[in-house]
Image: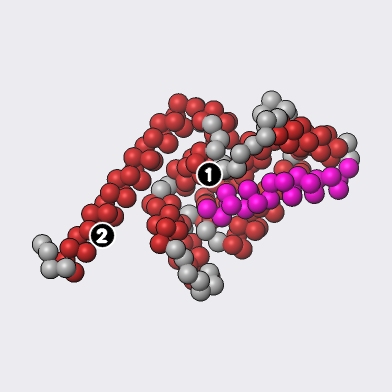
Amino acid sequence: MQPTIPGEAEGKREAIETIIEQVKAGEKQAYQAIIIQFERQMYTYCYYILKNHAETEDAVQDIFIRAYENLHQYKRQVSFSAWLYKMAYHHLINIKKKQSRFLNLIQHYKEQQPVMQISQHESVVYELLTYLTAEERHILLLKAVEQYTFDEISDIMGLKSATVRKKYERLRQKLMERISQKGEVARGTIAETNGIH
């Protein structure tokens, strides 16, 4: 995370709010600035859930179209970013419900990727993400990657803040147990190859 200059985040938020008002007033071209500001974040969020570049690109495009069509419903009580993530969350849930074949999707993702070296760390991260439910992945990504507070995540996902906090603690425990299991398997494999039982 890069350090922020005091007032920088508030300045960006105000700039986004100004652009939103311009778009609401009929300046359709101003919406491009919103896309530029949030496209990378949306892509990353969607990709971690969908695990497929083509589907992610489609989902991001759909999310921005829906956000544009529903911009009149946006109110400043929440940040535009949180509002957009809430829209993305619900869109991704709908996609996952329609597909309901997550394991096949992961295999398809692996087949579609160009041949490239993936670091062991990235490989472990992807494997751990596949171990989580879709809801747990959403919570983890919103908290750890996007660094939203539990209150903001509860608004995005439509859950109580305490529920989100509890689910986050459970998923952390689940991941720690999985990492511990993987470590035992790896140590056991190394021990066997060295003739130690």
User: Residue at coordinates 65% horizontally, 51% vertically from top-left?
Assistant: 40
Asked if disc 2 and disc 1 are in contact, CB closer than 8 Å, the reply is no
User: Residue at coordinates 74% horizontally, 39% vertically from top-left?
Assistant: 70
Kind of residue indicated by mark 1: Val
Residue 32 magenta-highlighted: yes
Q: Nearer the viewer, residue 173 or 118?
A: 118
Q: Is residue 109 left or right of residue 56?
A: left
The location of residue 192, given as percent across then percent down, is: 16, 66
Q: Is residue 78 left or right of residue 158?
A: right
Numbered circle sitting on residue 145: 1
User: Residue at coordinates 52% horizontally, 52% vertically from top-left?
Assistant: 49
How many other residues sit within 10 Å of disc 2, few (<14), some (14-19) or many (≥20)? few
Looking at the image, the residue that sits furthest to the bottom is 115
The boundaries of the magenta stretch are: 27-48
Question: Residue 54: in sight, yes or no?
Answer: yes
The location of residue 50, given as percent across then percent down, is: 54, 55
Which structural element holds mark 2? helix
Which structural element holds mark 1? helix
